[in-house]
Image (spheres, rainbow, N blue to C red):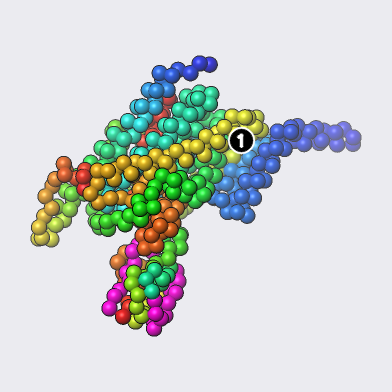
Amino acid sequence: MAELTAPIAGNVWKVLVAVGDKVEMDDEVVILEALKMETPIYCDESGTVTAISVKEGDAVNEGDVLVVFG
Amino acid sequence: MFDILKDLIFSSGVVSLTGGNLVMWLVAFVLLYLAIKKQYEPLLLLPIAFGILVVNLPLTYLMEPEHGLIWFFYHYGIELDIIPPLIFLGLGAMIDFGPLIANPKTLLLGAGAQAGLYVTFFAAVLFGFDLQEAASIAIIGGADGPTTIYLTSKLAPHLLGATAVSAYAYMALVPIIQPPIMKLLTSDHERKIVMKKLRPVSKLQRICFPIVTAMTIMLVVPSAAPLISMLMLGNLFKESGVVERLTNASANELMNIITIFLGLSVGATMTAGTFLNPKVLFIFFLGLFAFIISTAAGLLMAKFMNLFLKDKINPLIGAAGVSAVPMAARCVHKVGSEANRRNYLLMYAMGPNVAGVIGTVVAAAILLKNLG
Amino acid sequence: MGTDWSKVMEVFTSGIVGVFLVMILLQILTQLSTRIIDAVENRGKGSDADPDLPTASLKD
């Protein structure tokens, strides 16, 4: 079970995956908005999405869990 | 009857129009287009453009000393050095020095980028500008509107319009100007460097920083006082957390009000006489040169520091020493993510970005001390 | 309107040197104050306190 955590603080702009999706390394998973810039966050391993911990509009801090994989 | 008509015609501005005025109308229209349609720094460019337009309508006496409406804004706001420091108050209330406090080495990157200013100073002197003018042109490379306006209004007020418009225009163009230089001066391997996680910064440290910085800089370079005191006060408002009303007023209401007067006054200095001058073309060219050299200087400084560091910094963040906040930091992040998708440089780049603001103020203060 | 080159060099060098010196000074003071605050805050929490070592800080 791996977690994708936010590398920077920001607001969740878009969630690009759903529970059950298969993802590969370097796929765009979530887009955060920080300092008015769209920052895509990429997967660091392959797997299947088991849980999404944020929704669009949430404010996240560095280290907050975004997505959980199995 | 005919006399009344004749009088009306001859007291109108129309007959006093010069060709120069018409050219300046064109400049104003272009800037209005850029501001409104393209949204290039509209908060400043729109009032500046309107100021240009209005001052090139003859016989309005809007800029007439002791009488003109806009002259009063200009005299009390800019000549008396009130507006730029107040903008810094607002800026300080919005700025986050966290990434800088977490990694104070980035202050050196802020310093490195300022070296570009002095190279531009040299170049400007070679181009035939006198020392005060050269300094005002050099400060454009600091990528900091209020500091540019502050210094230019003191050293070379006749160049105010050109340097201010230059500074704001190139700040908006950072995403175009910087990447080629960044790619030229760094290797692919360097651009991929992932930096060590930033240590957390406590509230007390955030409160301590503006106090220490204000005292240090004002003691060492007193001519920086108007700008640095306001910048740090604004930041102290924000970090103390106890004066939210003052923080909000500084960052929002005050900032907005002051921006109106700033833009209008700066634009209104651009009469056909002062602006339509071959010197102005050189200023635009040197301004671009300043941005380029400062970016290069920041990058090279980062590479130099890496020779001595155990935990390497990604040299790209050196480019953020050009204190266009946060445009340069965003640009660094973009170029960094092109090299390594999972490298999120934005916060790391904010360190040098805000350090650059301090650096530019210090550079301006030293120029002022030497040439003022 | 000859340029006073000695003045130019003076401004150039004093400028570059000046900015660097001020920023280095600020860096040292920031690191110093940060470490002191770290030590004070850690002691308050009862865990191992960070020793106050300003000289080690430049090569962090």
Which residue is at the far right? B2
Tell me the residue at 37%/71% (across/down): A25
Q: Please, what is the three-letter code of the amino acid marked with disc 1? A: Met
Task: Give the residues in magenta.
Answer: A1-23
Name the one closer to the observer, B219 or B292: B292
Q: Position of residue B179 (x, y in %)?
A: 47, 49
* Total numbered circles: 1
Is B122 displayed left or right of B203 in the figure? Answer: right
Residue drawn 41% across the image and 20% down it:
C7
| Residue C17: percent from left, percent from top | 32, 30
In this rendering, is residue A34 above or below B187? below
Quarter of the image where the C terminus of chain B is located:
top left
Residue B45 lies left or right of residue B200; in this view the side is: right
Residue B16 drawn at (x, y percent): 75, 32
Q: Which residue is mark 1?
A: B270
Please check the rendered image and state whether residue A15 is part of the magenta-colored stretch, yes or no. yes
**Chain containing mark 1:** B
Q: Is B338 left or right of B111, judged from the image as shown?
A: right
Neighbourhood count class around disc 1 (C-alpha, 10 Å): few under 14, some 14–19, many 20 upward: many
- Residue at figure coordinates x 29%, y 34% from the top left: C21
